[in-house]
Amino acid sequence: QIVFDDDFPGASALEHQNSHLGIYVTAAIGSPFLPAIVAHEVYHAWNVKRLRPAQLVPYDYGRAQPTPLLWVSEGITDYYADLALVRGGVMPKQAFYQVTSRKVESEANSPPIALEDASLSTWIAPRDGTDHIYYDKGSVAGFMLDILIRDASDNRSSLDDVMLELYRDTYKAGAGFTTDQWWDGVSRAADGKSFADFHERYVDGRERYPWREVLPLAGLRLAVDSSRVPWIGVSLGQDNEGVKIMETVPEGMAAQAGVLAGDYLLRVGEIDAGMPMARYRERYAREPEGTPIEIVIRRGTETLTLQGGLQFSTRVSHTLGEAPAATPKAVRIRNGILQGQVDR
């Protein structure tokens, strides 16, 4: 069920056993964000409401149940939400590349953290910018694993086979899956290839993902560029009261102007807080550093206008695209991912 309500600040959705409920501001109608979150919650009816890590079986809504496999429950779900949209024709493959590029960029620009640690630490709401990284980082980890499984099996198997095997052998048996069962399933799908090194470096470890080695296996390449962009120096969240400032960077414009964690952001310069922050970067990209910027916040019952000075930071951008000289095998793997096919 989808509900649109202009009095609701933003968007929120939650999976249920056989359905999901999403509540959105009316402005979300027509946004590419809407089918993405719907696909995510629909896939949760299978991955989480049924297939679950062992630490979540049985599930108790009355207490925290930390698991190092939350990156599978949320990140892999997000990967399959993207696949569902491109395979179902809801979005073209170029849009899939753009969405994946954003996730790659999110992982590259986030503080280094192991996926397993991020899965566990979310229960204590860390303020270092890693509190939800297991979504994007976990999603592109699933993308990498899909490529590596298809490459090792000559595109006869995919990540789909891992998920189906776990569903059959754990959920259908009334149990959750363990870390060992996950990696054993990945190895079997990849014709016995070991993923111990992958787990040690990229899931239990903090190393950056090896896109230069992995993407060519699927006939893809990643262009990386850097630019100087306007920077506020905050991490933002959304609750029923508005756009909440979760954390400020001490050397950032917002902190130096007097903004505190817990304040609610109303406006930055000419840009309302409800608008994408990309609008802020576009508006002030050509202004000189130090240009006065008003920051309007709500603190308790007071509305305050603080004075900041425009700052810039170096932003690294990533663009995923098709490699022009891909091998026939790589093209089969790329098409298999986009179309949900294997060569059996």
Image: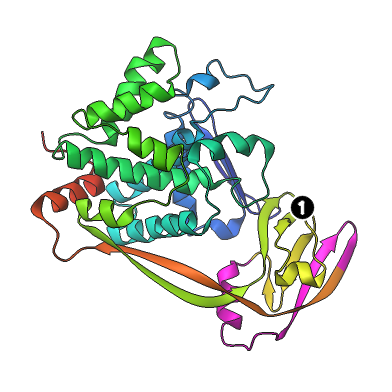
The C terminus: image quadrant = top left
Q: Nearer the viewer, residue 46 or 321?
A: 321
Q: Residue furthest right?
A: 301
Reply above or below: 114 against 298. Answer: above
Q: Nearer the viewer, residue 191 or 320?
A: 191
- In the drawing, does residue 339 fall left or right of residue 132? left
The answer to whether any part of residue 142 appears in the image is yes
Q: Is residue 288 magenta?
A: yes
**Magenta part of the protein: which range?**
275-303
- In the drawing, does residue 145 fall left or right of residue 278? left
Picture coordinates of residue 203, whole percent (x, y): 44, 39
Quarter of the figure with residue 270: bottom right
- In the drawing, does residue 62 fall left or right of residue 339? right
Picture coordinates of residue 280, whole percent (x, y): 61, 75
Mark 1 is surrounded, within 10 Å at the Cα level, by few (under 14), some (14 to 19) or many (20 or more) other residues, namely: few
Count all numbered tags in the image, as a single digit. 1
The answer to whether any part of residue 37 appears in the image is no
Picture coordinates of residue 263, whole percent (x, y): 80, 58
Q: Residue furthest top?
A: 173
Q: Residue at x 70, y 85 (%)?
A: 290
Q: Residue at x 42, y 28 (%)?
A: 46
Helix, strand or loop at mark 1: loop
Reply above or below: 102 against 20. Answer: below
The kind of residue on which mark 1 rests is Glu
Q: Label 1, on which residue?
A: 241
Q: Is residue 197 magenta?
A: no
Q: Nearer the viewer, residue 13 or 223?
A: 223
Q: Residue at x 16, y 40 (%)?
A: 155
Picture coordinates of residue 8, whole percent (x, y): 68, 51
Reply above or below: 56 against 290. Answer: above
Quarter of the figure with residue 102: bottom left
